[in-house]
Amino acid sequence: MEKRNLFMLLISGVLIICLLLAGYYKLEIAKKNTIIAQVSPDTSCDLQKTACRLTLPNGGSVTLDLQPKPIPLVQIIHINVTTQGIKPEAVSVDFKGTTMNMGPNNVALKADKDGLYSAKGMLPVCIRNSMQWQADVYLQTEKGIVVAPFIFTTHKH
């Protein structure tokens, strides 16, 4: 009878440890997917003409450059993000229409070299002659997500 009680106690201990580890893991994942900072956009910078840079709360910066210029609709665009003073684990850009829902348009970037991330993407066509967009750059860090929004306007040609 004592061996059975000892075995049950051992199994109970292992199960409790497994539950604690699973809870810790879930908390860590939730923490990494939490937005920890969101900076304000710089409305004076025009992505149609130049790359735009935002300063982050920790003193680092993020720069977004979309090529070619002017930024076309329904054509491949080259998305380049440069970071300084922050080393994200992952970088993505989410393009949203500010006055019209254009559906999800999230692009994951790949690391090219230290601090430089790139990908190809495309903006959908809009029925309006002029469309304002917000490109949210998501910087995934070990502490959570930093969001840097960039505002720009496209025009039908």
Image (spheres, rainbow, N blue to C red):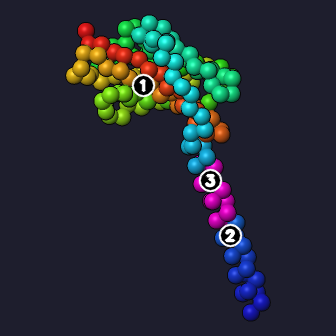
| Residue 109 is at least partly visible in this image | no
Q: Tell me if residue 153 comes above or below residue 11 in the rendering.
A: above
| Residue 16 marker | 2
How far separated are the C-alphas under marks 2 and 1?
Answer: 47 Å
Image spot of residue 2 (x, y percent)? 77, 90
Q: Which residue is mark 3?
A: 27
Image spot of residue 56 (x, y percent)? 63, 25
- Contact (CB < 8 A) between labels 2 and 1? no
Image spot of residue 155 (x, y percent)? 30, 13
Q: Secondary structure at mark 1?
A: strand
Disc 1 packing (10 Å; few <14; some 14–19; many ≥20)? some
Tell me if residue 28 is in the magenta stretch: yes
Tell me if residue 41 is in the magenta stretch: no
How far separated are the C-alphas under marks 1 and 3?
Answer: 30 Å
| Residue 96 is at least partly visible in this image | yes
- Residue at 47% of width from left, 28% of height from top? 136
Q: Nearer the viewer, mark 2 or mark 1?
A: 1
Q: Which residue is mark 1?
A: 134
- Residue at 74% of width from left, 93% of height from top? 1
Q: Nearer the viewer, mark 1 or mark 3?
A: 1
Disc 3 packing (10 Å; few <14; some 14–19; many ≥20)? few
Q: What amino acid is at disc 1?
A: Gln
Image spot of residue 104 (x, y percent)? 36, 34
What residue occupies the far left of the structure in this picture?
A: 127
Q: Nearer the viewer, residue 75 or 132?
A: 132
Left or right: where 110 falls relative to 102: right
The span picked out in magenta is 18-29
Q: Nearer the viewer, residue 45 or 11?
A: 45
